[in-house]
C-alpha cells in the first residue's frame, strides 16, 4: 500500500502521525511511505531520519494526497485539505465528526473512507487510540490550569498546593475516565484538594481505592456540581461519550456560582465541550473570559508537547496501520471488530450511529455497505 504522511496544518498542531522508527517498520513490510517535507520537524524528527527509515520525501501536501492510497494524520483535515481528499482513499486520524458538521459534509462528499482513531475499540470496549492522547491531555490540563490561575494570566492568583498555613486550591474534575484519572494524578501530586465527579459508581469506587487522601469522589449530578462550584478554583471537563457530542454539565447560569478568576479547562472541546460557554481555542490564543471566568478550550492540547505525543501516538496506532496496509480497510475490518468501529464515514454514508444522531442524519450500518 502507498501511505502518505502530510504535515499537520491546523493551528499550532506540532505533532506528526508517525515516527521514523514507525516508518521503518511499515517499509519493512513492503509498503511505500511518502512524507511531506518538514512534516516531523516540529516533533523533533528530521527529513533525513525519515529518508533513512525508507520514506520518500515529497515537497507539498498536494503531492502527498495525490499519490497516497491511505493518508495517516493526527488531526482532522481542515478546509484547505478538503479538495485533496478523493473517493477510494482511506484517511486514518482523529476526526471528532460529532462536533464539526462542515468537516462531516466534506468527507461525505469526497467518497473517502474515514477511520477515526477516537472510536476504534478493543474487545472490552476501551479506546486504544484515544487513550494515549487522553493521558497527555489529562496531565496537561492541570499544568495549564495552574498557569491560568496566576494573576497575570487573569486568574485568582492561587497556587495549587498552597503553602504551610494557607489552604491549597480546590480542583473539580468532571469525568473519571482516562483524562480525569490522569488529571487527578497530577493535581494530587501538586498538593491540591481534588474532587472527581462521575456517574459510574464502580468507577468512583475504583478511583477512591487507589487515589491519595487529597482526592475525593463525588456522584455527578447537577445538584452536587452546583454545591461544589462556590469552592472551586479550577474545573476540568473530562467527559467522553465515544463518537457523540458531549453533554453540557456546566451551564452559563452556573458560572455565577464560581468566584471571579476561576479557571475552566475543557478537555472535551473536541467533541463539543462539556461547558455551555466553551468554544474551541488555539495554542496561539488559548483563553477567553465569560462573566469573569477564564476558559481554556484548546482543541489539540497534546500538540503543545509534540515529541512525547508523537511517540505515544505511534506506539498505539502502528498495529492498526499494519493491518490496514497489509489487508486494506475492508478485510482488516472484517477480521477486527474493534477497528471496524472506527469507520465513521465511507462511500458517502455515515456508518457510526452517534455521528448521524448528532446532526439528525441517516445512519447506514457498515455491513450494508
Image (cartoon, rainbow, N blue to C red):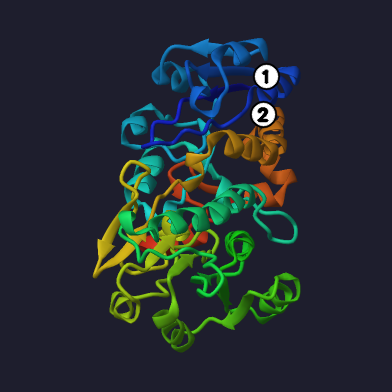
Residue 70, horizontal then vertical, whole percent:
55, 28
> Residue placed at 50% from the left, 30% from the top?
89
User: Please, is residue 16 above or below residue 258 in the view?
Assistant: above
Mark 1 Cα within 10 Å, few/some/many (few <14, many 20+)?
A: some
- Mark 2 and mark 1: Cα distance apart in space: 7 Å
- Secondary structure state at the residue bearing disc 2: helix
- Report if residue 362 is visible in the image: no
Q: Would you name the residue on which mark 1 appears?
A: 31
User: Please, is residue 115 above or below residue 188 in the view?
Assistant: above
> Residue placed at 53% from the left, 81% from the top?
220
Residue 223, quarter of picture: bottom left
Q: Nearer the viewer, residue 36 or 157?
A: 157
Q: Nearer the viewer, residue 182 or 162?
A: 162
Q: Nearer the viewer, residue 353 or 95?
A: 95
Residue 94, horizontal then vertical, whole percent:
51, 44
Q: Would you name the residue on which mark 2 appears?
A: 325
Which mark, by number, is residue 77? none
Say whether marks 2 and 1 touch (CB < 8 Å).
Answer: yes
Quadrant where the N terminus is found in the figure: top right
Q: Nearer the viewer, residue 8 or 48?
A: 48
> Residue placed at 62% from the left, 39% from the top?
313
- Secondary structure state at the residue bearing disc 1: loop
Circle nearer the N terminus (2, 1): 1
Residue placed farthest to the front in the image? 165
- Report if residue 315 is visible in the image: yes
> Residue placed at 61% from the left, 38% from the top?
308
User: Please, is residue 197 above or below residue 26 in the view?
Assistant: below
Mark 2 Cα within 10 Å, few/some/many (few <14, many 20+)?
A: many
Residue 338, horizontal then vertical, whole percent:
68, 51
Residue 114, horizontal then vertical, whole percent:
51, 41
Amino acid at each position: 500500500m502507498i501511505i502518505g504522511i502530510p504535515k499537520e496544518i491546523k493551528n499550532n498542531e506540532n505533532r506528526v502521525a508517525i515516527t521514523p522508527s514507525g516508518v521503518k517498520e511499515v517499509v519493512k513490510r513492503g509498503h511505500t511511505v511518502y512524507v511531506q517535507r518538514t512534516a516531523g520537524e516540529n516533533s523533533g524528527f528530521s527529513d533525513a531520519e525519515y529518508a533513512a527509515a525508507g520514506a520518500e520525501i515529497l515537497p507539498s501536501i498536494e503531492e502527498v494526497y495525490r499519490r497516497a492510497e491511505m493518508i495517516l494524520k493526527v488531526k482532522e483535515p481542515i478546509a484547505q485539505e478538503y479538495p485533496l481528499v478523493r473517493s477510494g482513499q482511506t484517511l486514518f486520524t482523529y476526526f471528532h465528526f460529532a462536533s464539526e458538521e462542515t468537516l462531516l459534509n466534506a468527507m461525505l462528499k469526497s467518497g473517502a473512507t474515514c477511520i477515526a482513531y477516537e472510536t476504534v475499540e478493543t474487545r472490552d470496549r476501551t479506546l486504544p487510540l484515544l487513550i494515549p492522547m487522553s493521558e497527555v491531555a489529562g496531565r496537561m490540563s492541570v499544568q495549564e490550569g495552574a498557569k491560568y490561575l496566576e494573576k497575570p494570566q487573569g486568574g485568582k492568583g492561587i497556587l495549587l498546593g498552597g503553602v504551610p498555613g494557607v489552604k491549597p486550591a480546590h480542583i473539580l474534575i468532571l469525568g473519571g475516565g482516562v483524562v480525569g484519572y490522569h488529571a487527578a494524578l497530577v493535581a494530587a501530586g501538586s498538593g491540591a484538594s481534588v474532587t472527581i465527579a462521575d456517574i459510574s459508581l464502580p468507577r468512583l469506587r475504583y478511583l477512591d481505592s487507589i487515589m491519595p487522601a487529597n482526592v475525593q469522589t463525588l456522584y455527578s449530578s447537577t445538584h452536587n456540581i452546583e454545591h461544589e462550584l462556590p469552592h472551586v478554583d479550577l474545573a476540568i471537563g473530562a467527559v467522553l461519550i465515544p463518537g457523540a457530542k458531549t453533554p453540557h454539565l456546566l451551564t452559563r447560569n452556573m458560572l455565577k456560582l464560581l468566584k471571579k478568576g476561576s479557571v475552566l479547562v475543557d478537555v472535551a472541546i473536541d467533541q463539543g465541550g462539556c461547558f455551555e460557554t466553551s468554544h474551541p481555542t488555539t495554542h496561539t490564543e488559548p483563553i477567553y473570559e465569560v462573566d469573569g471566568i477564564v476558559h481554556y478550550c484548546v482543541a489539540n492540547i497534546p500538540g503543545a508537547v509534540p515529541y512525547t505525543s508523537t511517540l505515544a501516538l505511534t506506539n498505539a496506532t502502528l498495529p492498526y496501520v499494519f493491518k490496514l496496509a497489509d489487508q486494506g480497510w475492508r478485510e482488516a475490518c472484517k477480521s477486527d471488530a474493534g477497528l471496524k468501529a472506527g469507520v465513521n464515514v465511507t462511500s458517502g454514508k455515515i456508518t457510526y450511529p452517534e455521528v448521524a444522531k448528532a446532526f439528525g442524519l441517516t445512519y447506514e450500518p457498515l455491513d450494508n455497505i
